[in-house]
Image: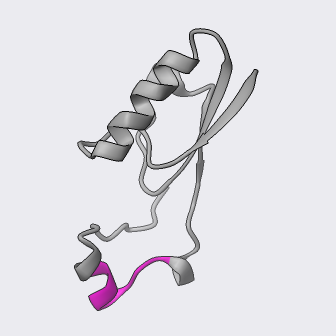
Amino acid sequence: MRILMVGHYPPHGGGVANHLDSVVALLRKRHEVHVLTYGPVKVRDFERDFVHQVRVPPRLRPQGDELRSSGLKEDSGAP
């Protein structure tokens, strides 16, 4: 089966990202799994073939007070 998982990946200390990492590891034992993620991502070497990153357009990123209240860190936008 071919499966696409969407979420914040790879794990960076958050519960959802850690859960996604565990689910992907289990599913990859028997299925073709790809991950679609966003934000600043440092893909680990063994994941380069199945982790795909999309960039959030600047106009859709949280700004100013919205960014501070979300607890997110500002992304420089550099690749």
- Viewer-side residue, 69 vs 39: 69
Q: Is residue 9 magenta?
A: no
Q: Tell me residue 50's x, y (percent).
A: 62, 28
Identify the residue shown where x is 63% and y is 25%. 49
Left or right: residue 19 versus residue 36 is left
User: Could you say which quadrant of the image residue 30 lies in?
Assistant: top right
Left or right: residue 34 versus residue 58 is right
Give the vertical position of 25 relative to 72 (above or below).
above
User: Could you say which quadrant of the image residue 54 lies in?
Assistant: bottom right
Identify the residue shown where x is 47% and y is 27%. 23
Give the vertical position of 73 relative to 23 (above or below).
below
Left or right: residue 78 versus residue 30 is left
Give the vertical position of 61 relative to 38 (above or below).
below
Residue 44 showing in the rendered view: no
- Viewer-side residue, 14 vs 74: 14
Work out which residue is located at the far top of the displayed protein and give it: 29
Work out which residue is located at the far bottom of the displayed protein and give it: 65
Identify the residue shown where x is 76% and y is 20%. 1
Q: Which residues are magenta?
A: 61-67
Work out which residue is located at the far right of the displayed protein and give it: 1
Identify the residue shown where x is 51% and y is 26%. 24
Left or right: residue 28 versus residue 2 is left
Q: Tell me residue 74's x, y (percent).
A: 31, 71
User: Could you say which quadrant of the image residue 12 lies in?
Assistant: top left
Residue 33 showing in the rendered view: yes
Q: How is the image coloured?
A: one colour
Give the vertical position of 75 relative to 4 (above or below).
below
